[in-house]
Amino acid sequence: MMIQLFNVYKNFGPKNPAIVDVSLKIEKGEFVFITGPSGAGKTTLLKIIFCSEKPTSGNALVNRINLNRIRERDLAFLRRKIGIVFQDFKLLPNRNVFNNVALCLEIAGVQYSIIRKKVHQTLRHLGLAKKERYYPPQLSGGEQQRVAIARAIINNPLILLADEPTGNLDPDLTMEIMAVLREIHERGTTVLVATHSQDLLKNTGKRIITLNKGRIVK
Amino acid sequence: MKTAFVKYFFRQALTNIADNRMVHLVGIGTIAIAFIIFNSFVLVYVNINHWSDELGKSLTMSIYFKDQPESIQVEEIKKELINIQGVTIDKYVSKEEAMKALAEELGDKAGLLNGLHENPLPASLEIIFSRADRDDSLPYHLKRKLEKMDIVDEVQYSQEWTRKIKAIMGGIKLIGSIIGGLLFLATLFIITNTIKLTVFARKNEIEILRLVGATNLFIKTPFLIEGSIQGLLGGLIAVIILFAAYMTVIIKTELRIGFAALDVVFISPYLTVFLLLMSVIIGFAGSSIALGRFFRT
C-alpha cells in the first residue's frame, strides 16, 4: 500500500473544516484522480499526503511512514520520493529552467554530468529544450506548468502528486501533459491528479475520488 | 561530503553574494572597520611586547653623576662594582661623549644642540649584569646603595623600563579586550542582520527547497559559507589596510623612548592568520545565529 488515510480531519480554524473524516487507500502503481468543485479539499488532501500540512486528527501513512510521527530529516528524504506539481508551480524565479529542474537532483548530491544529461532529456521530452536558459517570469503559464512537471518527474518518484496540472493549458497541451503523466505511471509511479476539469476525467478508465466540502462523496 | 554538494554550496553562496551585492558590501565594510580598530590594538600590543623583549634581552644599569666626577671618584666606584659577582663594567661616558653621541643620534637635526649654553647631559657609568644574576634584588639593592652616594645623581636600570612597559601593556590588554569584546558583539550583530536580510529575501526559495526534499543542512550551508566569506573578506581588507598604513606611515615615523629609537614591527604571519580565522569565525557565527532564528520561526 502506497498511501493510507485513516479518519483524517483537517481544520483551518474552528468553523473552517477542509477535510472531514477521510479514509482511503491507494495501491502502489495506481493512477487516481481526485476531483470536486473549488474548495472541496483537493489541494489540502494532496498537501496532507505531501506532509506540508499535518492532519488535525487521524493518521496518514505514505510508503508505510506515519506522517504524524515523521522527523524533519526523514521528511526531507520522503519528499525526494514524491514528485509534486503545485497549482502555483512554485518555481524559483531567479534560477533558469535548467537549474529549477536540476534542483531535485542537486539536493540528492547527483553528479553534475548526470544532472545535465537527465535534465536535457526531461526538458526535451516536455518540449522545453529551447527554453533551458529562460527564467520562469519569461515563460508562459503553460511552459511554467511543464517546467514544474519536469522538476516533479526528474527523480523517478515513487509517487507523483499533481494539483491541476492542466489548469493553464490549451487542449493540445493538456493531452500532451496527460500522456506524460500516463507514461510516468506506466514506469511504476503511483500518480494522484487533482482536477476540477470534468473533460479530463472522461474515458480515463482510472479510479476517481470525488470530494465535496472536505468529504469523500464518491 | 560529496564534491557535487561542495560545488553546489559554493556556487550558491557566491550567487547569493552577487545577487545581494549592496547588503554584503555594507557587511564586509563593517567587518573591515571593526577589524581595523581591533587589529590596531593588536599591533600596538605586539610592538610594546616586542620592545619590552628587546629591552629585557640585556639588563643594563646607568649610573648618572651629578657633575663631571673626578676620575679617581669614578675609579673608586668601578673598583667597588667589579667586586660584585655578576657585574661587568661596560663603559664610562663623560658629559662630552654623551653630547657627541646625542648629536650623532640626531643626525641632521644636531644643529638644535647649538643653542644650548651648557651641556645638560650627565656623565654616566654603564654596567651590565650577567644572565645568571637577572633576579630583581641585585640591581634593586645596588641602585639604592649607589643613589646614597654624593656624586651619584640617579640610577636607572633596564628592568625598570620592562616593568613600566609591562604595566602599560596590562592597561592596553584590558582596554583592548573591552573594545575587542564590544567590537566582536557589534560585528556579530551586523553580520547576523546582514545574513538575516538575505535569508528573508529568499524565504520563498527556502520554502521551495524544503518542499522538494532539501534537508535543513543543505539549505543552511550556502548561507554559512556566505557569512564566512563575508568575514574573511572583511578581515582581509582590514589586514591589507593596516599593512598599507604600516608601510606608508607607521614605519616612517620614528618612535623613541627617551633617546632610544624603537623599530615598529607588523603583526606576525601566524597572528595575521589567526586574526583572519577569527573574522571567518565571526562571519560563520553571525550566519548561524541568523539561520537559527529563521529556522525556529
Image (cartoon, helix red, strand yellow):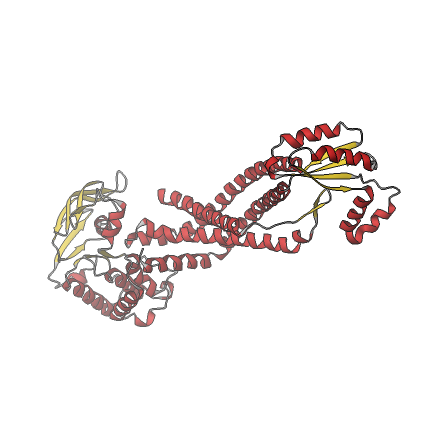
Residue A116 at x, y percent in the picture: 30, 67
How many numbered marks, from 0 up?
Answer: 0
Is B211 positioned to the left or the right of B112 in the image? left
The quarter of the picture where residue B142 lies is: top right
Q: Residue at x 37, y 50 (%)?
A: B220
Residue A86 at x, y percent in the picture: 27, 56
Is B139 positioned to the left or the right of A75 in the image? right
Residue A194 visible at all? no
Residue B70 visible at all? yes
The answer to which of B160 and A67 lies nearer the viewer is B160
- Which residue lies most toward the right here? B117
Q: Residue at x 49, y 43 (%)?
A: B189
- Which residue lies most toward the bottom here? A130
Is A1 positioned to the left or the right of B41 in the image? left
Residue A195 at x, y percent in the picture: 21, 57
The quarter of the picture where residue B294 lies is: top left
Q: Residue at x 79, y 39 (%)?
A: B123
The answer to which of A63 and A144 lies nearer the viewer is A63
Residue B206 at x, y percent in the picture: 35, 52
